[in-house]
Image (cartoon, rainbow, N blue to C red):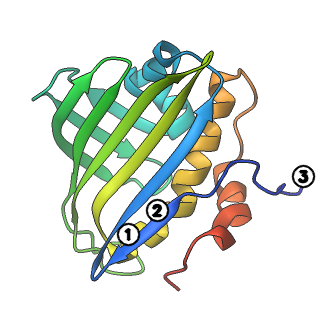
Amino acid sequence: MTQPQAPAAPAGEVRIEGDHASLYFDRFLPHPPEAVWAALTEPAQLAQWSMNQATIEGREGGSIDFVTAPANFHWTGRILAWEPNRVFEHEMTMGPRHDLPFDMPGEQAVVRWELSPEGSGTRLRLSFRNLRRMTALGFAPGQHVLLDRLAAQLANEPLPNFMQGQETVRGLYPSWR
């Protein structure tokens, strides 16, 4: 087994606002916006790097339905903005979960993916708004690794191990423990 390496990608930002929080990530990807958009919105590509089984009704007012691995979270929501190769914003709604080591009261958040051409690549800005504080603190390291996996997939490189990657980047983020 190889040892996890220090992350090359910049850390995201966690902003705590009382019982809720927001996450912000900013990454440069050396690939055109069309390639990044496809990886974010085509279910077959999304399944590889994000480990989501997804249904996306690609239009403003359409819907999303994601089942995430390894935690088996089921997220649904309405698409709030759909501007191909530029903006994909959607609700992220999940009902309460009582089958975890802790009670999760459910979520009603908004996820926004913004793509901007930058040189021969793309500036990706990702935000999660209105997450419950505990969810945001748990999500931050995982989302960091998912973005690393997105970058690797776009570069046709092996995808980083999700669990090892989380352990590697966990210290970059506030802890809920």
> Hey, what amino acid is under mark 2?
Phe
Measured in 3D between alpha carbons, the distance from the residue under mark 2 to the one under mark 3, in whole angstroms, is 24 Å
Measured in 3D between alpha carbons, the distance from the residue under mark 1 to the one under mark 2, in whole angstroms, is 6 Å
In which image quadrant can residue 73 be found? Answer: bottom left
Direction from residue 102 to residue 58 in the image, left or right? left
Numbered disc 3: secondary structure = loop
- The answer to whether residue 6 is above or below residue 104 is above
Q: Nearer the viewer, residue 21 or 106?
A: 21
Q: Is label 2 in contact with label 3 (beta carbons under 8 Å)?
A: no
* Label 2 Cα crowd, 10 Å radius (few <14 / some 14-19 / many 20+): some
> Which numbered marker is on residue 2?
3
Q: How far from the left and from the top, in percent, is residue 65?
A: 25, 38
> Hey, what amino acid is under mark 1?
Thr
- Residue bearing mark 1: 135
- Residue bearing mark 2: 139
Measured in 3D between alpha carbons, the distance from the residue under mark 3 to the one under mark 1, in whole angstroms, is 29 Å
Direction from residue 126 to residue 169 in the image, left or right? right
Residue drawn where x is 43% and y is 28% of the image: 115
Q: Nearer the viewer, residue 144 or 76?
A: 144
Among the two numbered marks 2 and 3 on one chain, the one whose residue lies closer to the N terminus: 3
Q: Is label 1 in contact with label 2 (beta carbons under 8 Å)?
A: yes
State which mark lies toward you, 3 or 1: 1
Q: How far from the left and from the top, in percent, is residue 95?
A: 18, 62
Residue drawn where x is 71% and y is 43% of the image: 160
Numbered disc 2: secondary structure = helix
Residue drawn where x is 88% and y is 57% of the image: 3
